[in-house]
């Protein structure tokens, strides 16, 4: 039992859940709405720095700081999602990549974020005066994850979710059907960003120190790999993809495999991700659990339906 609640293993699960939240937000944007983003790590960073700055420099209660960070990330993501109205597909990916690099540069050079020295002394969370450590923090992030999954399921099965999926399949057809593509595209960036902001805020209050290097392109590319491999437009695909690719390096460390030099673990990890991406794109283009298209609901005995 003591080994099960070893702080090292608990921390692995906590960070895994944080990455699942991050992946759910990206899958909403890319998998359900078809808006490819290579700058999702920037929204992760905005949530983390917003909560950290509000807690450290503005003296806000950490709980309030987390809530405000999510709202702030929602608003900023909506504003940064405006370029998606003019560009599509590869051009959208390049645009989001550029936005992500700009935001990371701001984190590195702004006095507000601590610049190259980073932001430290971020307070942890406490509940009725009891500091939430290890298992307590794990239970909290599990609750947040369950709420996030429930909200995502409700959204994607609603009229909003069907509109996103029509836009994903063909934006021109969506517009001809009377769907306000401008509204729904900005909305999905905002909600996806809010998920990333929540993950970032939880990350900030767990590690207590933030560095701009934690929110660069590598994070965006890694999370995108997890989502694509698990399955676009699938919640269980995100759960599977993030869990598989996040825990794999930990298995290397756990078994201390002699064939791998642990100094080059990050290099091995990215090589494996790349190879797995190639194989999945070749044999399962939508990912392992990915949706193949919009499901049509039968209407009456004669068939037919709508998205």
Image (tube, rainbow, N blue to C red):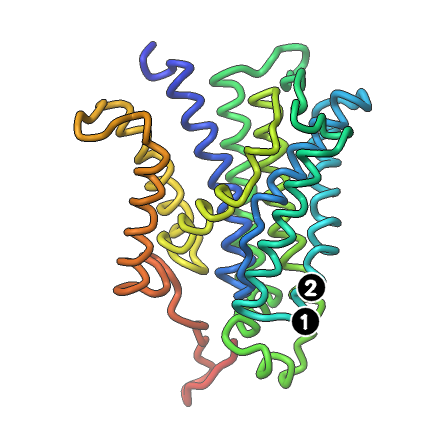
Q: Residues within 10 Å of mark 1 (few under 14, many from 20)?
A: few
Where is residue 181? Give x, y as percent.
Answer: 66, 73
SS at badge 2: helix
Question: Which quadrant holds residue 197?
Answer: top right
Where is residue 279? Give x, y as percent.
Answer: 26, 58
Where is residue 231? Give x, y as percent.
Answer: 38, 57
Do the residues bearing badges 2 and 1 touch, measured as CB atoms within 8 Å? yes
Where is residue 46? Give x, y as percent.
Answer: 67, 39
Q: Residues within 10 Å of mark 2 (few under 14, many from 20)?
A: some
Residue at the right extreme of this rendering: 58
Q: Residue at x 63, y 85 (%)?
A: 176
* Camera-nearest residue between 116 and 158: 116
As drawn, 123 above or below 198: above
Residue at the bottom extreme of this rendering: 302
Q: Residue at x 42, y 15 (%)?
A: 7
Residue at the left extreme of this rendering: 259
Q: Residue at x 34, y 37 (%)?
A: 267
As drawn, 90 above or below 148: below
* Camera-nearest residue between 83 and 50: 83
Of the 4 image quadrants, the one containing the N terminus is: top left
Q: Residue at x 55, y 27 (%)?
A: 140
SS at badge 1: loop
Residue at mark 2: 83
Residue at mark 1: 86
* Camera-nearest residue between 152 and 195: 195
């Amino acid at each position: 039992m003591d080994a099960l609640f070893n702080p090292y293993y608990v921390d692995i699960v906590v960070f895994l859940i944080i990455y699942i939240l991050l992946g759910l937000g990206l899958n909403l944007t890319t998998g359900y709405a078809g808006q490819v983003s290579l700058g999702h790590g920037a929204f992760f960073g905005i949530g983390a720095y917003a909560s950290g700055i509000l807690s450290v420099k503005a003296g806000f209660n950490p709980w309030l700081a987390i809530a405000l960070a999510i709202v702030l990330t929602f608003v900023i993501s909506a504003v940064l999602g405006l370029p998606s109205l003019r560009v599509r597909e590869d051009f959208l990916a390049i645009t989001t990549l550029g936005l992500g690099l700009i935001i990371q540069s701001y984190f590195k050079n702004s006095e507000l974020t601590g610049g190259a020295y980073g932001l430290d002394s971020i307070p942890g969370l406490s509940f009725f005066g009891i500091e939430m450590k290890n298992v307590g923090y794990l239970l909290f992030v599990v609750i947040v994850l369950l709420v996030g999954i429930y909200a995502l399921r409700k959204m994607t099965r609603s009229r909003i979710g069907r509109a996103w999926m029509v836009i994903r399949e063909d934006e021109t057809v969506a517009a001809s059907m009377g769907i306000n593509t401008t509204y729904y595209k900005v909305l999905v960036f905002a909600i996806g960003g809010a998920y990333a902001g929540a993950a970032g805020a939880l990350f900030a209050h767990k590690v207590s120190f933030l560095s701009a290097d934690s929110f660069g392109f590598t994070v965006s590319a890694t999370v995108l790999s997890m989502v694509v491999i698990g399955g676009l437009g699938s919640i269980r695909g995100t759960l599977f993809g993030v869990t598989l690719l996040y825990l794999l390096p930990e298995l290397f460390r756990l078994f201390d495999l002699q064939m791998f030099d642990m100094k080059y673990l990050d290099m091995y990890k990215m090589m494996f991700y790349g190879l797995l991406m190639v194989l999945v794109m070749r044999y399962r283009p939508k990912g392992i659990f990915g949706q193949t298209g919009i499901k049509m609901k039968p209407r009456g005995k004669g068939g037919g339906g709508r998205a």
